[in-house]
Image (cartoon, helix red, strand yellow):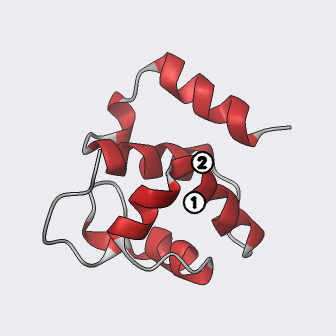
Amino acid sequence: AAPPAGLSRLRDLRNLGPASERMLLAAGITTPDELDRLGSVEAYRRAIAAGGHRSLNFLWSLDAALLEVDWRDLPADRKSLLRSQVEP
């Protein structure tokens, strides 16, 4: 799902605030469209590699931002799938 049209700042996406935006910017992800192209898992990996802190809530927030839902509403099976893609 593409981010809502007209949004240019990452922090304008649902679930993402200034701290999430800083982590994404540090990873070279600068727009909602870039986040959408990479997907939540790759964006999370890049943010962690750039020095961001590991947080499943951050991963879930990224995924939910792209789906335009509250991160707390992601189904448990979706959260498990995401977790399995980023944890060793």
**Label 1: few (<14), some (14–19) or many (≥20) C-alpha neighbours in 10 Å:** many
The residue located at (57%, 74%) in the rendering is 23
In the rendered view, does 8 fall on the left or right side of 46? left
| Horizontal relation, residue 73 to residue 21: left or right | left
Tell me, yes or no, whether the two marked residues, 1 and 2, touch with CB atoms within 8 Å: yes
- How far from the left and from the top, in percent, is residue 6? 13, 72
Disc 1 secondary structure class: helix
| Image coordinates for residue 71, horizontal then vertical, percent | 37, 40
Q: In what quadrant of the picture does the C terminus appear?
A: top right
Residue 78 place in picture, x, y as percent: 50, 25
- Answer with the quarter of the image where residue 36 lies: bottom left
Residue 41, given in percent of the width and then of the height, sits at: 59, 48
Point out the image quarter for the N terminus: top left
Left or right of 40, for residue 71 = left
Check the image and name the residue furthest to the right. 88
Q: Secondary structure at mark 2?
A: helix
Name the outermost residue toward the front.
37
Q: How many numbered badges does the structure rendering display? A: 2
Report which residue position mark 1 lands on. Answer: 43
Crowd rating for badge 2 (residues with CA inside 10 Å; few <14, some 14–19, many 20+): some
Q: Residue furthest top?
A: 77
**23 left or right of 88 in image:** left
Vertical position of residue 77 compared to residue 23: above or below: above
Separation of marks 1 and 2 at Cα, in angstroms: 5 Å
The residue positioned 40% from the left and 76% from the top of the image is 18
Q: Amino acid at mark 1?
A: Ala
In the depicted structure, whether residue 11 falls above or below residue 44: below
**Location of mark 2 (residue):** 41
The amino acid type found where label 2 is placed reads Val
The numbered dot on residue 3 is none
Which residue is found at the position 74% from the left and 74% from the top?
Answer: 51
Residue ID at (34%, 67%): 32
